[in-house]
Image (spheres, rainbow, N blue to C red):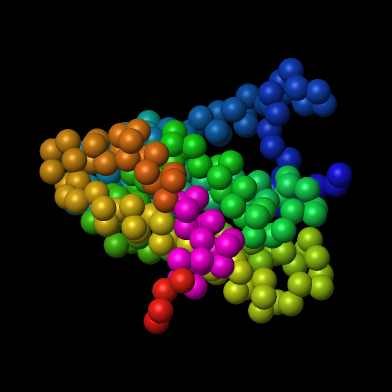
């Protein structure tokens, strides 16, 4: 059975001992390590002082790089902070391309997201979602990430089947992204005040993340099944 086209812009970096994999150069290893250091430093600073602005100089110093090096990797502080969200959404979209061609697109979407959202994988995304509540610029960038995800889904649908009407592809993609955002918002609304001491840690504990995982899957399942609860409600 054939599989859908993988949307990854480049093949993943394979381990050195994987079949067909060449050794990763020291330069690429160093670049990846620098990028991780910057992202880690950015999140650590935001976590410690969510209400205080982060300067490029402070972030570069915490990551052990120069200001110039920081801007060689990221166009803004918020871009560095948003990496976990971007990576999560990229993984979800790429999972669409690994499913059998005869999988209905709505079912494929549920499976792709489900396979991407273990509780552990959700933790950095959930943390940034909560921290963005006090950081309007980060919240705006997260919205852009969701919109970019929708654009990639449209690209996937249109490339996988050129006969898919553009409006249908766009409507489905926006509905899918909207379901994901609604699930995060619903989860966040049930947490209560997480700004108190220990509140964020409780909000990011495994029981809470498992609720988020279940909420996202439920939202996508509602979309796949045509919102049966609404069909049985008299409006």
Name which quarter of the figure residue 196 lies in. Answer: top left
Q: Residue at x 76, y 72 (%)?
A: 164
Q: Nearer the viewer, residue 184 or 221?
A: 221
Q: Residue at x 46, y 71 (%)?
A: 232
Q: Is residue 94 left or right of residue 114?
A: right
Q: Position of residue 95 (x, y in %)?
A: 65, 46
* Quadrant (top left/top right/bottom left/bottom right) for the N terminus: top right
What stretch of residues is rendered in magenta?
216-231
Q: Position of residue 166 (x, y in %)?
A: 70, 77
In the displayed structure, 40 sits above or below 113; it is: above
In the displayed structure, 82 sits above or below 185; it is: above
Q: Is residue 210 left or right of residue 20?
A: left
Q: Nearer the viewer, residue 140 or 150?
A: 150
Q: Position of residue 204 (x, y in %)?
A: 31, 38
Q: Position of residue 5 (x, y in %)?
A: 78, 52
Q: Residue furthest left?
A: 196
Residue 223 among those drawn in magenta: yes
Residue 187 among those drawn in magenta: no
Q: Nearer the viewer, residue 155 or 60?
A: 155
Report how many numbered discs are placed on residues in the image: 0
Name which quarter of the figure residue 61 lies in. Answer: top left
Q: Residue furthest right?
A: 1
Q: Is residue 76 visible?
A: no
* Quadrant (top left/top right/bottom left/bottom right) for the C terminus: bottom left
């Amino acid at each position: 059975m054939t599989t859908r086209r993988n949307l990854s812009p480049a093949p993943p970096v394979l381990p050195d001992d994987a079949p067909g994999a060449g050794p990763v150069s020291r330069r690429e290893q160093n670049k990846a390590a620098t990028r991780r250091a910057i992202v880690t430093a950015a999140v650590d600073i935001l976590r410690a002082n969510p209400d205080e602005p982060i300067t490029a100089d402070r972030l570069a110093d915490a990551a052990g790089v120069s200001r110039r090096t920081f801007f060689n990797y990221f166009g803004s502080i918020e871009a560095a902070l948003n990496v976990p969200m971007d990576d999560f959404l990229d993984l979800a979209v790429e999972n669409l391309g690994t499913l059998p061609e005869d999988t209905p697109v709505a079912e494929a979407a549920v499976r792709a997201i489900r396979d991407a959202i273990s509780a552990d994988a959700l933790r950095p995304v959930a943390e940034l979602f909560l921290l963005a509540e006090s950081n309007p610029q980060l919240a705006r960038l997260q919205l852009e990430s969701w919109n970019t995800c929708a654009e990639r889904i449209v690209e996937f649908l249109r490339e996988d089947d050129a006969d898919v009407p553009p409006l249908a592809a766009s409507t489905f993609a926006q509905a899918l992204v909207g379901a994901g955002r609604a699930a995060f918002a619903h989860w966040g609304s049930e947490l209560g005040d997480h700004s108190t001491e220990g509140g964020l840690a409780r909000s990011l504990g495994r029981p809470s993340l498992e609720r988020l995982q279940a909420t996202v899957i439920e939202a996508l399942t509602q979309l796949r099944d045509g919102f049966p609860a609404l069909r049985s409600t008299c409006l």
